[in-house]
Every structure is written in structure tokens, then in C-alpha cells.
Amino acid sequence: MKRWLSTIDTTILSMAGLRFVSATIELTAAIAMLMLNDVKKAVALNAMLALVGPFIFIATMTIGLLSMTDDLSFSKLLFIGLGVGFILIGIYK
């Protein structure tokens, strides 16, 4: 297992690690909703999750884009950044 992990790029490990953290938070919130068995508390938990998702998305994209800065031109990075911005605007508006 250790040999296998050493062959994976550290950027990919960081991005996947953030996704694992996000999944753990989501699963924990789902279990908490079931245990609380209250709609008001479930809505409050869901509201807190609405903050976690975009943060993980932005952090993951930032890690990926920073690792690709040598491979991409500035204009391509700008377009990718605009695309991420449009995704966030579409989610919140």
C-alpha cells in the first residue's frame, strides 16, 4: 500500500484528500439528521453544509490549477477561473 501511494502525484493526493474530508462531513451530517429526527435541525445542518461544498470545490480547484500553472498559458488559466466563477454564480443566484 505504501509503495502504491508513493507513485501517486501529491497534488492528486491533496485533491482526493479534500474530497474524502468533504464526503466524511456530508455522511456525518446525514447520520446526525437521522439521529436528531427534527426537520428544523436538519435544515440548519443542511445550511451549514451549503458552506462546506463550495469551500471544498474552490480549494480543490485551486490546488489543481496551481499545479498546472507551468503547463497552461495565462489566458487559459483566466478562462478556467472565469468558468469556476460562473459555476459559483450559477449555484448562488
Image: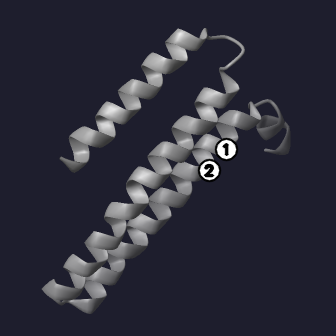
User: What number is the disc on residue 80?
Assistant: none
Q: Is mark 1 on a helix, strand or loop?
A: helix
For the image shown, how many numbered marks are present on the structure? 2
Left or right of residue 11, residue 16 in this image: left
**Image spot of residue 69 (x, y percent):** 67, 20
On the image, the x and y values in percent for residue 82 come to 39, 26
**Relative to 2, 48 lies left or right:** left
The residue type indicated by label 1 comes to: Ser
Q: Relative to 84, does residue 20 appear above or below in the rendering?
A: below
Graded by Cα atoms within 10 Å as few (under 14), some (14 to 19) or many (20 or more), the crowding at tag 1 reads: some
Residue underneath mark 1: 14
Q: Who's the residue at 20% across and 77% down the image?
A: 43
Quadrant including the N terminus: top right
Residue at image mark 2:
17
The residue closer to the viewer here, 54 or 38, is 54
SS of the residue under disc 2: helix
Front-most of residues 93 and 48: 93
**52 above or below 8?**
below
**Residue occupying image coordinates x 54% and y 54%:** 20
Name the residue type under label 2: Gly
Q: Is residue 92 shown above or below 35?
A: above
